[in-house]
Amino acid sequence: MAAPLLRYDLLLARRSFADSFSTARDRLLLAMVAVLAVLWMRDAATRAAPSLPPGAAMMALLAGPAAYGWNAAALRRLDWFRESSVLAPQALLPRAGSSYIAFAQLPLLSILAAGVLFLGAFTGAPSRASAIAILSYGAGLALAAGAGKRAERPAATADAARRKGGTNCPGPFQALLAVQTFGGDRPVRSASLLIAGAALSTLAGCLVAAHQPAAARFAAALAPSVLLLVATARNAPDIVGLLAFAGYRAASVARFVCAIPAANLAAASIALLLVRPEGWPAMLESLLLLHLLAALVATARAWLSPGRPARRVDVQVQLEILALLIVGTLFAPLVPPVAAWRLRLIHRHYSRSLWVQG
């Protein structure tokens, strides 16, 4: 059964929380942020609900990227249980693995169900929103299961990247790119195929949804990029730690991890400009903001990685994003300077971890 695996993860989550919020001041700050977030969400929902058009039910397509990212992480965690943990005998049982993945759906499904009920209630199309969310969730789950068959092996990936020939890309770049592209033997080609597929999906989606409501057009233009960015948002703390040990500067690491968001932004923008659907300037601006956020998150995760476990890095980055969202609701012009200040502090953390000064 999956009970030992679940108990182990819950224990780690509790200890990670205690490590991240070790003082009473930290917990008080977290409680204040949580209360402000709940109040903001309630206020935003009250203001936005009456103005939602029927086509906004297409936003249920976002259940697909969410399902993909969540289940890809759950499958990687199950692989770790099977290969490297003391609970491997339990994790290797087929029933235990299936139960673990089934239980892992509950947190995400509860959040998505609330969102779909909200969309359905205020767009007047509850059945449509539910059907779209179910199909999209199933597609994301199937893609995650397919990608999970190619188990990630960081050390082997790094060695393969260093031995790779026929390309001018440096070894560290290929090692990080291989992690982002599911551990393929030819990471540059895999990344190129993923970006080309997302661009073609953007082009096809814009053509198909050209005469649909605004929400459907936006979903068609943004969904392929969201899916790709979620799928490739994979951190490699061990590799980044080695890069810091070898003296690679923070700017170099940032360029490595931001290569896919930058390339996909260019490809998706070209696809959008070829069609130019109604409202395309706003779609282009949304694409830019989406990829800028992905690049900032990737950079922050990489710069925080040396000397820290991946779980702690992810918790801190998520809290940083939540804090920025709250700052944006209180006074939006403060977001850029606050983000720059926090990024500067994270940059200092990475710089202090350099063992070899070049």
Image (cartoon, helix red, strand yellow):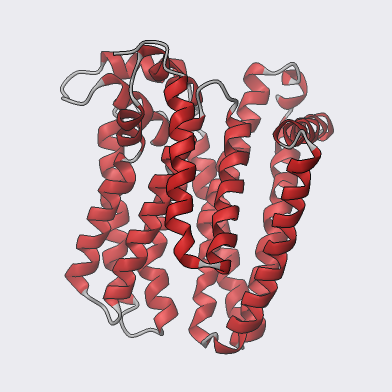
Answer whether residue 49 is visible to the viewer in this image.
yes
- Quadrant of image for the N terminus: top right
Indicate left or right for 136 with 223 as reference. right
x 45%, y 26%: residue: 350
Is residue 236 visible from the viewing direction of this image?
no
Task: From the top left corner, tell me how far across and down residue 122 is, in percent.
Answer: 63, 85
Location of residue 78 by image quarter: top right
Left or right of 147 on screen, residue 81: right
Residue 38 appears at what percent x and percent y? 72, 65
> How many numbered circles does the render carry?
0
Residue visible at 69% across and 50% down in the picture: 105
In this rendered view, identify the residue nearer to me: 222 or 357: 357
Say which of 226 and 68 sits in front: 226
Quadrant of the snapshot with the C terminus = top left
Say above or below: 27 vs 3: below
Left or right of 29? Residue 47 is left
Place of residue 335 in the rendered image (x, y in percent of width and height, measured from the top left): 47, 58
- In percent of width and height, residue 222 lies at 38, 64
Residue at (29%, 40%) from the top-left corner?
259
